[in-house]
Each structure stands twice: as structure tokens, then as C-alpha cells.
Amino acid sequence: MLIDDITIKVSAGRGGDGAVAFTKNKMSLGPSGASGGDGGRIYLEGITDLEALRPFRYKKEFVAQDGGRGGHRLNDGATGKDITLKIPVGTVIHNKTLDKDYEITKIGEKLLMAKGGHGGKGNFLFRSSHNTSPKQFQRGLSGQSYTLRLELKLIADVGLIGLPNVGKSSLLNELTNAKSRVANYPFTTLEPNLGSYYELILADIPGLIEGASRGRGLGIKFLRHIERTRVLFHLISVESENPLRDYKAIRVELKNYSEVLLGKKEYAFLSKSDLISTAELKKKIGVLKKSKIAALPISIHDWESIKMVEKILNKIIKDKKA
Ligand SMILES: Nc1nc2c(ncn2[C@@H]2O[C@H](COP(=O)(O)OP(=O)(O)O)[C@@H](O)[C@H]2O)c(=O)[nH]1
Ligand SMILES: [Mg+2]
């Protein structure tokens, strides 16, 4: 099961205490206690792995390292080591302590969630003309500590949809760095998968079948995720006896779930085009065309067709920037 809602506690490190020390060197007598180091910080960073929230089921508390104590001879304490927690892009972060929400929407985006406490000053910094041998120092301050609820609301630029077994996962793997599971039977993929194509995020949305919008199968859980995609790639397999029927079955599910999904920009593809003859392929394209569906033939075994899909993706990148 996809973990998409989990609460954790993060605490940044404490600052190190300042030191009180004096040099014994006759040439330079005086205070030399150094300052403590700052406490380590807690960051959150966006990655494409949708399963990234899973480890938080087992470990829910994260404490960054404290800053080191100030040393003698002006050796400041070491800065505490930071912790960076990786979470899937599209995760909304609810800071329950502050009642504030944040969101990570880009791969590699890093948010500072909890600041480490400042290190305290050592006695060297308290010296003055009135007090040449101060014994004062400061203690390090506590780091910030928060309770965070992490809620995954998948966002992808492109959602790959279609009936089971049409080649969604294969296409995702072909176009991106994803390693979505592929096999020749329906429901191999039970969770959405993400991959990145340059700055675009592509999502493989599994489980769409007739009745998905009414809760049949797992599809309804994923329809929610399609809501936040920009463009849909709708795959129809050439293996189908009736591609038009397949196409419409999915459109009905989108519509039943929300009209918003129907209104999204959609590209239709006749997938696995290598499996039938050119004549048969033309016939199937023709049938779809009659219903005003301009389906483009693709195959993961046809390099030219993959190039064509990449061209479409490049255009989506351009539009996104505009
Ligand atoms: N011949 C051929 N087989 C394909 C192509 N794309 C996918 N397949 C095969 O079709 C089956 C289902 O593919 P998969 O990507 O798991 O489909 P999904 O259920 O839509 O994700 C697998 O056996 C794939 O190897 C293609 O372009 N040509
Ligand atoms: Mg799949």
C-alpha cells in the first residue's frame, strides 16, 4: 500500500556552549574561550520516489546533531550535522506546531524545516577594556522542534492513463529513469510510479478499469492523483479488438470522477504498434479518427515513435515555461 499520510517529529540540534579559557602563553595572556557551534538543521528534499514516505512508518523521530562546545585557544565548536529527509515531490507538509503548510513541488527542492540553535559565545567575546579576564560565557540555544504531518498529493505534469496492460509502465520506463514494474498481465503495477523527463514529472497511473470511479478496483484512489496533472497521455493498445470502446471506457471513468479530468489536454496513442501490420494499424487509426480521436501509433520497439513522444514532451516543457 502506498504510504501517503504520516506524522513525524523533527528536532534540530542544540547550539554548543561557549567556553571559558585563558591562554597561559606569556606573550598573549587573556581570555581564549571559543564559541559553541550551531546545532544541525533539518531539511526536507523532494525526490520522485513515491515510496519515500514508507520508512517514516518505522522511524518517526529525527534529531539533528548538537553543535560542539567551544574549545580553548579560540577553537570554535563544530557545527552539528544536518539531516535531510527525502520525501516525494507533491508532498504537502503541515507543520502542526506552527499551524503552517508548505509544499515541495520540484525534484531537488530543499526546504529548511527546523533551524539549529545558535552556539553560545565563549569568554573571548566578552573581553573589554574594563574586563580583561571575563569568566562569562553563553549556553547554546535549543534548536527548533516540530511535529510535521506529511501528506502526499501527487503532482505530475503528465499522467499516463489507459486500461491495464496497454504499456503505460513500459513507456514510463522508456522515457524516464523510472523502474516501474512491467509484465504481460493486468494489474502488474499496483501503485502509481513517477519518473522525470528533464524538468517534467511523468506519472504512470495504474488501475483504471470500467467502474473505477465507482470504487471498483484501486483506480479511484489514483483518479485523485490525475486531478493534479497538466496533460494526459492516453494509451490504447493495438491488441484490442475495439480500441474505440477501450478509449471511451476510460473517458467515462474520468468524467464520472470529475469533469475537470475530461477538460485536460490529452494526447491519444495507439500503443504496441509493432504487433500488427501497417494495414491493420491504419484501419484502427481510421476508426478512432472517425470519432475525432487523433491517435498516434507508438511502440517501445520503434525508436522513431519514442522520439516523436519526446518531441511532444519538449513542447509541454516549453508551454510550462511560457
Ligand atoms: N510488443 C510490444 N509490447 C509492449 C510494448 N509496450 C509494452 N509491451 C508489453 O506489454 C505488457 C504490458 O506492459 P506494461 O507496461 O506492464 O503495461 P501497463 O499495465 O499499462 O503498465 C508487457 O509484457 C510489456 O512488455 C510495445 O510497445 N510493444
Ligand atoms: Mg503498469
Image (cartoon, rainbow, N blue to C red):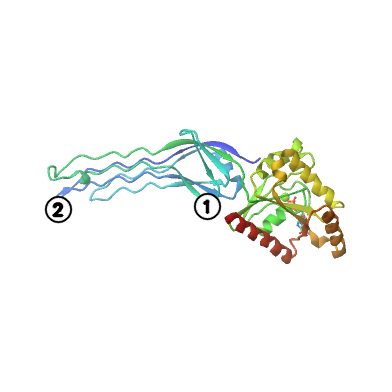
Q: Label 1 is placed on what type of residue?
A: Gly
Q: Is residue 78 left or right of residue 227?
A: left
Position of the C terminus by quadrant = bottom right
Position of the N terminus by quadrant = top right
Who is closer to the viewer here, 280 or 44? 280
Per the image, label 1 sits on a secondary structure element best described as loop
Q: Mark 1 or 2 closer to N-term?
A: 2
Number of the label disc, if any, that sits on residue 36 = none
Q: Position of residue 249 (x, y in %)?
A: 80, 45
Among the 4 quarters of the image, the one containing residue 277: bottom right
**Label 2: how many Cα within 10 Å (few below 14, some 14–19, many 20+):** few
Read off the residue under disc 2.
28
Q: Label 2 is placed on what type of residue?
A: Ser
Q: Position of residue 267 (x, y in %)?
A: 73, 54
Among the 4 quarters of the image, the one containing residue 280: bottom right
Per the image, label 2 sits on a secondary structure element best described as helix
What residue lies at 64% left-to-right and 54% top-to-bottom?
178
Q: How many marks?
A: 2
Is disc 1 in contact with disc 2, using a CB cutoff of under 8 Å? no
Q: CA distance from mark 1 to mark 2?
A: 49 Å
On screen, 197 above or below 62?
A: below
Q: Position of residue 165 (x, y in %)?
A: 77, 51
Q: Is residue 159 left or right of residue 285?
A: left
Which is closer to the viewer, label 1 or label 2?
Answer: 1
What residue lies at 40% left-to-right and 44% top-to-bottom?
65
Q: Position of residue 112 (x, y in %)?
A: 45, 45
Q: Is residue 280 left or right of residue 265?
A: right
Please indicate, yes or no, whether residue 93 appears anywhere in the rendered image: yes
Among the 4 quarters of the image, the one containing residue 271: bottom right
On screen, 209 above or below 283?
A: above
Number of the label disc, if any, that sits on residue 108 = 1
